[in-house]
Image: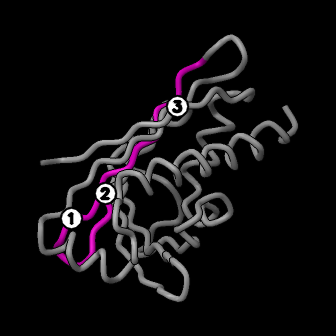
Amino acid sequence: MTERVEVEREIAAAPDVVWKLVSDLPRMGEWSPENTGGEWVKGATGPASGARFKGRNAAGSREWSTTVTVIDARPGERFSFLVTTGPLKIAEWSFDIVPSDSGCRVTQTWIDRRGKLITFVGLRLSGVDDRATFSRQSMEQTLAGVAAAAESSPP
């Protein structure tokens, strides 16, 4: 069974400002409670379909890295990526941004792509028993941080 979690937040900033933040994967560690940032790899210098990124994560004393491949990079509208470890799919993440009267509405989505083996290994590696609940809480914290950064940016 595939798990899916969505969190929405209204952000008082222009869609392009928010998109620039959520697509800046090296900065994601500023807002995420688990991701600590990372770097673009294999010649990638920023968000574009097919670009690759090495993500770093931490939970307590545990640390690990993942490979991220950008799926969709439409400025001001959508940013999505697939997280893998070697050939194993871990999760698909997306940020959908829709203009609103006060700025934009952002929907962050997490789709669990792990099989049974990687779910078991992931539990041991991350220490997270309930990934869906943890992801929801993390997404709420991440979007709160993105909102704070976007809303404090000059127009």
**Residue annotated with mark 3:** 8
Q: Nearer the viewer, residue 74 or 36?
A: 36
Identified by mark 1, the residue type is: Lys
- What quarter of the picture does the C terminus occupy? top right
Residue wearing tag 2: 82
Task: Give the spatial CA distance, label 1 vs label 3.
Answer: 25 Å
Residue at image point 46% right, 72% down: 55
- Please give the range of residues in magenta: 83-99
Can residue 64 be seen at all in this image of the molecule?
Answer: yes
Q: Amino acid at mark 2?
A: Leu
Percent position of residue 77, x then y? 49, 30
In this figure, which residue is indicated by the disc labeled 1?
Answer: 89
Q: Residues within 10 Å of mark 1 (few under 14, many from 20)?
A: some
Residue 51 image offset from top left, x and y in percent: 39, 61
Name the residue nearer the viewer: 6 or 51: 6
**Of 103 and 118, the residue lying toward us:** 118
Q: Which mark is residue 75?
A: none
Helix, strand or loop status at disc 2:
strand
Q: In the image, what residue occupies the spot 31% across and 57% down?
A: 82
Name the spot of residue 72 as percent of width and height, x first.
Answer: 36, 43
At mark 3, the secondary structure is strand
Question: Would residue 50 be counted in the magenta stretch?
Answer: no
Q: Pointer 3: residues within 10 angstroms few (<14), some, or many (20+)?
A: some
Q: Amino acid at mark 3?
A: Glu
